[in-house]
Amino acid sequence: MSTENKPKDVNRRDFIQKTSAAAIGSFFIVPRHVLGKGYKAPSDKLNIAGVGVGGKGFSDTNNAWNKGAENLVALCDVDWGQPQVKKNFELHPDAKKYKDFRKMFDEMDKSIDAVTVSTADHMHAIIAMAAMQRGKHVYVQKPLTHDIYEARMLTEAARKYKVVTQMGNQGASNPAQNQMKEWFNKGLIGNVHEAHVWTNRPVWPQGIPVPTGKHEVPADIDWELWVGCAEWVDYNPAWHPFKWRGWWNFGTGALGDMGCHLIDPAFRTLGLGYPTEVECSVGQVFIKDWTAEYIPEGCPPSSRVQLKFPANKINKSEVTLTWHDGGLRPFHPDLIPANDPLGEPDSSNGVLLIGEKGVMTCGTYGIAPKVYLKDGTKLEYKQGDFGNKYTTMPEFGHHVSWSDACKAGFNSKEHKALTSSFDYAGPLTETVIMGNLGIRSYNLRTAKADGKGFDYPGRKKLLWDGKNMKVTNFDEANQFVQRKYRGDWKLA
């Protein structure tokens, strides 16, 4: 990836902001004040390109497009055969179509203001960095990156290139999270010392043997480009389009899928930063009696991860946060009645904050927060039916607020008001991926000297130096801080 392309001194956004009329191609753009109140001139619209435009990328591109409030000028995906990619192409016939994002950037550099990135996890950082180096604002699906190092680099790059950024953990823009912060800041539950976060993920095959067999690559897929910076594997329908999530080469497991959604309310409400330690345990798989499967290439079927955070100015207590996945969840604390669900109505996903004076709980995206106090008081935030949580604006306006901030510019009040710009999303992602570092370290093994069995040296509490991105008491774990890219792929 070339690092030669830097933001231009004068770009399209500057042009729009500094002129009242513009000649684009053969068309003369008339200022909106001439055309009447409420008219939106084409020069007021953001030119958006999408990379990864099927699946979650379908909603990301179209929510940012906002029913024509902005321009969707390019759609890029390595698999033109996906039904939602085809649908996106049909919805936007005037958008240019690409498979290779590098070609798109080269050909349309001056026609693109902002980029959405909704590919498999392993390509997030490289695509986002390439866009930012060209001065493009970026919206990147959660998790922001595949590893900790990438998250730090994107966070720093957003400031360096002065671009507006947002991660796709849309619950960050849910107004219910403001209510949680208000309750906490009033001291209702006191300082929190214990937090639990849980999910029913994975909801795809995980903890299974590595897929095998020879498969022909479908004609619509550029498999070389799909694998991208990851270690090479031959095409297999077990990887794409959805099940890549369960394999470390491409995905980040249950934690990567839901951690940025579910850890977010605790991270935001309590003002958490880098954790100081991580320890975990993982579920085992037995296909043969008495012989546990060893599948280091794949994420486990279930896990529990414990992260510790120091006290801070907002929460004056050390916090122990425990992540549970694979359908595991915490048990009811005494203050929550036996018949009340934890988190969501079916308790499948949720957040629980245990404080000195009470407890607070919510569901995915911060939905339906509740407070239970020691004096018997129960507070509940009303937001409509759980199954109809997007009644007022798709995905809480998370995409639209980003589009508006892009037009307002870097460091504008709109930019500063974003709920998951990389200044926030980067440290949150580092925390989430720190859990995966613990899981992968847990599965490291070495043969015993007598050749009978294995030792597992990573099954310990790992001490973390967040500032320097380093495990200080088990150096072998640091291989998971930054992965090696295949071939000529580079981050910067």
Image: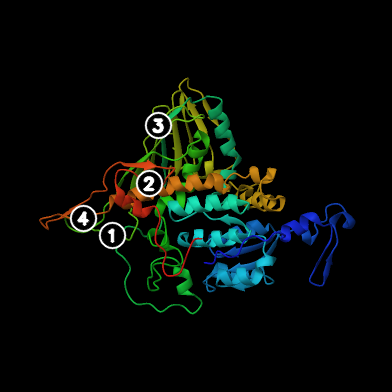
Counting residues from the N terminus, which is met first, the one under dot 1 or under dot 2?
A: 1
In the picture of the structure, the residue carrying the numbered disc 3 is 338
Horizontal side, residue 457 vs residue 13: left or right: left
Q: CA distance from mark 1 to mark 3?
A: 39 Å
Residue 474 is marked as none
Counting residues from the N terminus, which is met first, the one under dot 2 or under dot 3?
A: 3
Residue 295 visible to the viewer: yes
Residue 202 visible to the viewer: no
What amino acid does circle 2 point to? Lys
Please rate how many residues cluster around mark 4, counting C-alpha atoms within 10 Å: few if below 14, some from 14 to 19, many from 20: few
Q: Nearer the viewer, mark 2 or mark 3?
A: 2
Q: Position of residue 228 (x, y in %)?
A: 46, 68
The residue that appears at 58% across and 38% down in the rendered structure is 176
Q: CA distance from mark 2 to mark 3?
A: 42 Å
Above or below for 392 versus 312: below
Q: Position of residue 191 (x, y in %)?
A: 46, 26
Q: CA distance from mark 3 to mark 4?
A: 46 Å
Residue 470 is marked as 2
Check disc 2 and report its element: helix, strand or loop: strand
In the picture of the structure, the residue carrying the numbered disc 4 is 446
Counting residues from the N terminus, which is met first, the one under dot 1 or under dot 4?
A: 1
Q: CA distance from mark 1 to mark 4?
A: 14 Å
Counting residues from the N terminus, which is met first, the one under dot 1 or under dot 3?
A: 1
What amino acid does circle 4 point to? Thr
Q: Position of residue 431 (x, y in %)?
A: 44, 45
The residue that appears at 29% across and 63% down in the rendered structure is 209
Check disc 3 and report its element: helix, strand or loop: loop
Q: Relative to the observer, which residue lies in front, 426 or 235?
A: 426
The residue that appears at 42% across and 49% down in the rendered structure is 433
In the picture of the structure, the residue carrying the numbered disc 1 is 295
What amino acid does circle 1 point to? Ile
